[in-house]
Image: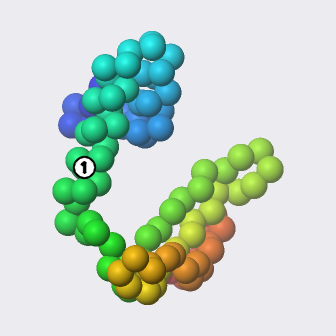
Amino acid sequence: MSCCGEPGSVARSPLVQAEEVKRRRDIGAEIGGLVGGHRALTEAPWYPSRPCDRLMLTLEATEHTPRTTELYEVIGGGDGMELRLVDIAPEGAEGGW
């Protein structure tokens, strides 16, 4: 199994890692992955979100759609926070955020 720090290794997304564990039917590793993912999220310097924070998502290309990047901004406060779409940039778009 490769990890991000090894030279020549390929980083796998959390989703790919979760699918591998499910395929092996390894409930201990599945629970460990969920707990580790929660810990990584809640210990991140940007957690919890605050108004004006920005989130950038990249949606990979499919056979029907190009790769697209979406930019969202956190608006509101307290329990009423939500994400507002700011911009969508298709693959190869010039300019920037």
> Residue at the spot x=40%, y=77% of the render?
79
Considering every residue shown, the one lying at the far right of the view is: 64
Q: Amino acid type of disc 1?
A: Ala
> Residue at the spot x=44%, y=78% of the render?
81
Considering every residue shown, the one lying at the far front of the view is: 79
At which x and y percent is residue 91? 63, 63
Of residue 29 and residue 12, the one placed in the foreground of this image is: 29
Q: Is residue 45 above or below residue 50?
A: above
Of residue 61 and residue 32, the one placed in the foreground of this image is: 32
At which x and y percent is residue 48? 28, 69
Q: Is residue 63 above or below residue 2?
A: below
Q: Is residue 18 above or below residue 57?
A: above
The answer to whether one can see residue 47 in this image is yes
The crowding category of the residue bearing disc 1, from other C-alpha atoms within 10 Å (few below 14, some 14 to 19, many at least 20), is: few
25 on left or right of 64: left
> Residue at the spot x=51%, y=63% of the render?
57
Which quarter of the figure has residue 24?
top left
Q: Tag count in the figure?
A: 1
The answer to whether one can see residue 8 in this image is no
Q: Which residue is mark 1?
A: 40
> Residue at the spot x=31%, y=43% of the render?
37
Here the colouring is rainbow
45 on left or right of 75: left
At which x and y percent is residue 89? 62, 72
SS class of the residue under badge 1?
Answer: helix
Of residue 17 and residue 48, the one placed in the foreground of this image is: 48
37 on left or right of 54: left
Which quarter of the figure has residue 9?
top left
At which x and y percent is residue 49? 33, 73
In the picture, the quarter occupied by the N terminus is: top left
